[in-house]
């Protein structure tokens, strides 16, 4: 019994360590958020389309460096992992550079949030 508990704890720590390393190396989790749709991906970028209806929110998730292009006018409240809250008012055609972030968004406006997000993957060294 004691051995199976030790193996279970060791396995959980191993899974956690892989996740931390994966994120630290600039990788992102697969998109399981129905409001984010992968439109294109290769070894350099991942292109996502965001659609968040008025009043909808998305779960916490992580982005590496990214560029966001707003397709619609919208107002969104983003809550970072540390609890910091930012409100963004975007106009269609706005372009925004984003540093790596873990956050969740909530559409607090009356229009749909529609945007294209281009995530930049780290260069692989030979």
Image (cartoon, rainbow, N blue to C red):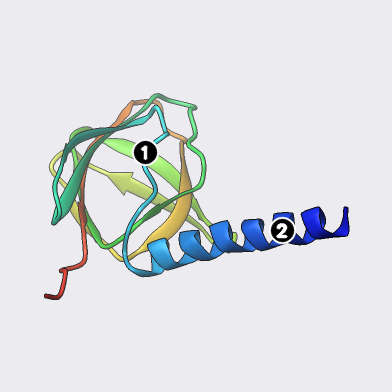
Mark 1: give few (<14), some (14-19) or many (20+) Cα within 10 Å: few
Residue pictured at 87% horizontal, 59% vertical:
2
Residue pictured at 39% horizontal, 62% vertical:
22
Horizontal side of residue 115 vs 58, given as left or right: left
Residue pictured at 33% horizontal, 68% vertical:
25
Residue 47's spot in the image, x, y percent?
18, 43
Mark 2: give few (<14), some (14-19) or many (20+) Cα within 10 Å: few
Q: Is residue 15 above or below residue 123?
A: above
Horizontal side of residue 124 vs 85, given as left or right: left
Q: Which residue is mark 1?
A: 31
The single residue placed furthest to the right in the displayed view is: 1
Which quarter of the figure has residue 7?
A: bottom right
Q: Which marked residue is nearer to the observer: mark 2 or mark 1?
A: 2
Residue 31's spot in the image, x, y percent?
36, 38
Residue 79's spot in the image, x, y percent?
52, 52
Calculate the distance from the C-alpha at mark 2 to the C-alpha at mark 1.
Answer: 30 Å
Residue 30's spot in the image, x, y percent?
36, 42
Q: Quadrant of the C terminus?
A: bottom left
Which label's residue is closer to the chain start, 2 or 1? 2
Q: How many marks?
A: 2
Q: Tell me, for residue 7, which label it has, or none.
A: 2
Query: Are dots 2 and 1 in contact, CB under 8 Å?
Result: no
Q: Secondary structure at mark 2?
A: helix
Residue pictured at 18% horizontal, 34% vertical:
71
| Residue placed most toward the observer, 95 or 46 | 46
| Residue placed most toward the observer, 13 or 37 | 13
């Amino acid at each position: 019994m004691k051995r199976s508990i030790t193996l279970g704890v060791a396995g959980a720590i191993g899974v956690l360590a892989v996740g931390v390393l994966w994120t630290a190396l600039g990788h992102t989790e697969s998109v399981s958020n129905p409001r984010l749709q992968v439109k294109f991906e290769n070894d350099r970028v991942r292109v996502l389309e965001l659609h968040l209806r008025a009043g909808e929110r998305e779960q916490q998730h992580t982005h590496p460096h990214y560029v966001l292009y707003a397709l619609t006018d919208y107002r969104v409240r983003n809550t970072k992992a540390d609890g910091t809250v930012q409100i963004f008012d975007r106009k269609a055609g706005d372009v925004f550079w984003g540093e790596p972030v873990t956050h969740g968004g909530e559409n607090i406006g009356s229009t749909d949030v529609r945007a294209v997000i281009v995530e930049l993957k780290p260069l692989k060294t030979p």
